[in-house]
Amino acid sequence: MISPIALSFVLSAATLAQPSIPELAVQSGRLDTLVTAVQTADLLETLAGEGPFTVFAPSDEAFARIDQNTLTTLLQEPGHETLRRILAHHVVAGEFDAADLVGRDSIETLAGTTLTLEVARDRLLVGDSVVESADIDASNGVVHIIDRVLLPPAPISPLKAFLDRAVERGVPLFNDGSPEGCAAVYATALEAVVSSDGWGIEDQQRRNLLGTLKETASINDPGERAWGYRRIIDSLGSNMPMGPSATSDTKSLFDFSDPREVNRWGVVVDGVMGGLSTGFVRQQGGNLSFTGETSLRNNGGFSSIRAGLPGGVLSGYDAVRIRVKGDGRTWILGVRSQSGMGGDSYWTRFETRKGEWMTVTAPISEMEHHFFGERIPGRISPRNIRGIEFYIYDKKSGPFDLEVESIEGVRGQSL
């Protein structure tokens, strides 16, 4: 592998004009790890090409934040394809200086992914990173040095893409009062998967899938049959084993790198009872962001978001685990026996530390039963959970901010 010093000599000898992006990286003295990664991923020729390109370049300090075993793996042969995808996630076709970026909400990368753009306290944020040095001009584009390595969302497998299309066709049918049509769409898609090769399904999983499909087809109620097929689709889409042999200790409920997952959440505020609190939900850096302000006027004081879950998706799991960054206030994680409106839910309160990421595990059996905010007796079984929610309801007024990275179902040994 050519050292950065040797590379600098070779590239500098090639041109006496303004440096290209790779030359600039070598000369900066802050991007040596990036230079090594670009060489390893065989992207040097691309980034030295005509362009123009905009590169969000992680500094050496940004790479130092990565687990070094992970970085070593990426720099070795089996990890090169992943490394190329990560680096392409930092490169944009076209030349965009800071002024151009400030006027945008997002931008598409060479990896086919999207980076969110935001301005906070006069600093430009790109995904989860902060631009430390902007508008460093090169002969074939511009470089912005950032303080973090940005990780792209995992590529969607052909199986998941196929099943997602089936869900997109089935859900409107179900919502328009035709669960029979929805079930038929799901069944057709699943039969296509089980009857053909190339989906990456192992023989034992295929046998389990056949048995589960037969059981689901025998369900008389069309709505429950549609939900049964949907549970199979969700399990296949998350690569979970099917049938009695399923042994996974965790079940991902939401992947917020997909904007559609964020769109599943609706806001419910105290305005339904005359209050004046606000609430807004959006995608931010691959996470769900819930912001707003609580007001105690007109007997208000709460804001919430909620989303439906497929019936039975938490069967066999005994807790919900979340990864969140809060604002120092007390929050509520809740589950519901219905996906829509209604005041019946089960709560766990958790304290947050302002600006700090934390993991909270809430045993379902210990969640408190509430009806329109009043505690009443009762517990909920995991198999009956059809909705999940977050509440800010601490009898305080003022702005709030909760960022959610992940929501999972977990079994006892994972608590």
Image (cartoon, grey):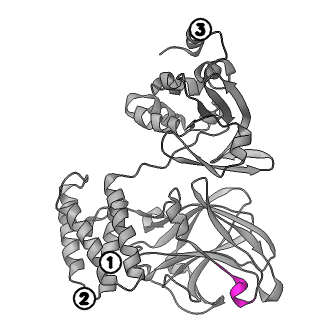
Q: Quadrant of residue 301?
A: bottom right
For the point 46% across and 38% down, which residue is it? 85
Q: Is residue 273 magenta?
A: yes
Which residue appears at 23% of the width and 72% of the height? 212
Where does the image place residue 280, in percent across and percent down from the top left?
67, 69
Residue 315 in view = no
Residue at point 36% right, 70% down?
A: 169
User: Separation of disc 2 and disc 1 at Cα?
Assistant: 14 Å
Spatial separation of the CA atoms under disc 2 and disc 3: 74 Å
**Is tag 1's residue or tag 3's residue first in the polypeptide sequence?**
3
* Towards the viewer: 42 or 112: 112
Residue range of the region highlighted in magenta in the rendering: 268-274
Circles 2 and 3: CB distance less than 8 Å? Answer: no
Residue 220 — which label? 2
Residue 228 picture quarter: bottom left
Label 2 element class: loop
Image label count: 3
Q: Label 1 belongs to which residue?
A: 182
Q: Amino acid at mark 3?
A: Phe
Residue 271 image position (x, y, % from top left): 72, 84
